[in-house]
Image (cartoon, coloured by chain):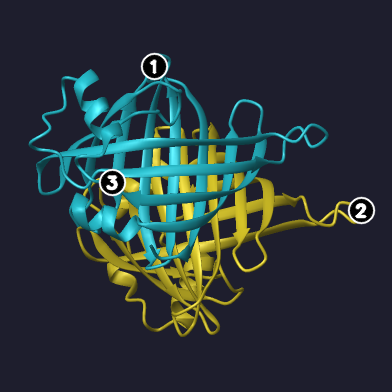
Chain colours: A yellow, B cyan
Amino acid sequence: MDIDQFVAKSIGLWRSMRSGHSLAFQQFEDVLSTISISAAQENDPEIINFLLTNKKADSSKISSPFKMTWKAESDWNTEEESVSSGSCILIPLPVSSNAGLLFRSVGYAEEESAISEYLFLDDGTFILNTKYGQSIAEERIWFASENLRCRSSIIRTSSGTGILQTSFASEVRKIQN
Amino acid sequence: MDIDQFVAKSIGLWRSMRSGHSLAFQQFEDVLSTISISAAQENDPEIINFLLTNKKADSSKISSPFKMTWKAESDWNTEEESVSSGSCILIPLPVSSNAGLLFRSVGYAEEESAISEYLFLDDGTFILNTKYGQSIAEERIWFASENLRCRSSIIRTSSGTGILQTSFASEVRKIQN
């Protein structure tokens, strides 16, 4: 698996069931959401803008940039329903066939832009490591079938010693494009 | 990672947060449970008995047999509280340093004895594939740290085409031995 194949397999509209585990408090959070993943053009104004303000990304070497939008409905705060939504540009910069960097306009663990390191395991599992200001996230994404993507995450304290929370999402594709 | 190292790292008393996702009905099931994993002696009567009735396991080639007991408390049926518990013997039979068979006296997806195939990915992730009468299970176990084990599962129909449910457990070790 390389990043172009991975992005191509991820394109579509996905219905996600996601469970978050707060380890210290043994609390569960179950969230249903919709995630849309679409290919972006390398000359998309958002991409060009992001690359201009993030000098680390060499625009001649990026590959398969894509966009994600999501809309989530949480089981917390049922009286005042908590709905979160957002969108994000993701720009891969391969350094070899199975590893590279991924630039994100909005982070996963914290809402700041982020640079992740990615690699593929020998069975095609995608592993993404991201350092934020206050935390470190490890995400894993693998395809159980063409239309089921599994995604786990582990969030550690920035010192790397404590683990704050984990999560797992089952993502079922509803529409392919 | 080989099976002996993996079993040694797994010994202890673990507190598990597990979320099950029923994909067709988009239902969540969150379960807290306690899991105890202990090494078994190769001359343990339960092991000898199991090997006698399961001719496929060559007793001279088994390695690091272990026992698991678990006690779970489900969020379903809150009026009539649903508690499940059980125990199981697991007997690895390595065929190479990173792959082999695993005999279980009680299966994971169905309550029958089962023979699984296991392999380790290059980062040490343990993958276990099991065919039952009515279903096929893929489990993945990996260590996020010495005291946090992550475990995911995917249950398919026995024809392999439909995916019935997924689950994810965050297991925190409370006692090492």
> Cα distance, mark 2 to mark 1?
42 Å
Extreme residue in the right direction: A79
Which residue: 38% across, 39% down? B139
**Helix, strand or loop for disc 1:** loop
Which residue: 90% across, 56% down? A80
Instruction: Let me know if marks 2 and 1 both belong to one chain.
Output: no
What x and y, as percent, mark residue B63?
Answer: 16, 44
What x and y, as percent, mark residue B55?
Answer: 16, 19
Q: Quick one: B61 or A103, which is closer to the camera?
A: B61
Label 2 CA crowd tier, 10 Å (few <14, some 14–19, many 20+): few
**Residue identifier under label 3:** B40
Numbered tag placed on residue B158 in the rendering = 1
Q: In the rendered view, would you say B152 is above or below A22? A: above
Asked whether the viewer can see residue A39, the reply is no
Numbered tag placed on residue A79 in the rendering = 2
The chain carrying label 1 is B
Label 1 CA crowd tier, 10 Å (few <14, some 14–19, many 20+): some
The chain carrying label 2 is A
Q: Mark 2 belongs to which amino acid?
A: Glu
> Cα distance, mark 1 to mark 3?
32 Å
Q: Nearer the viewer, mark 1 or mark 3?
A: 3
Q: Mark 1 belongs to which amino acid?
A: Ser
What x and y, as percent, mark residue A120?
Answer: 27, 56
What x and y, as percent, mark residue A21?
Answer: 60, 58
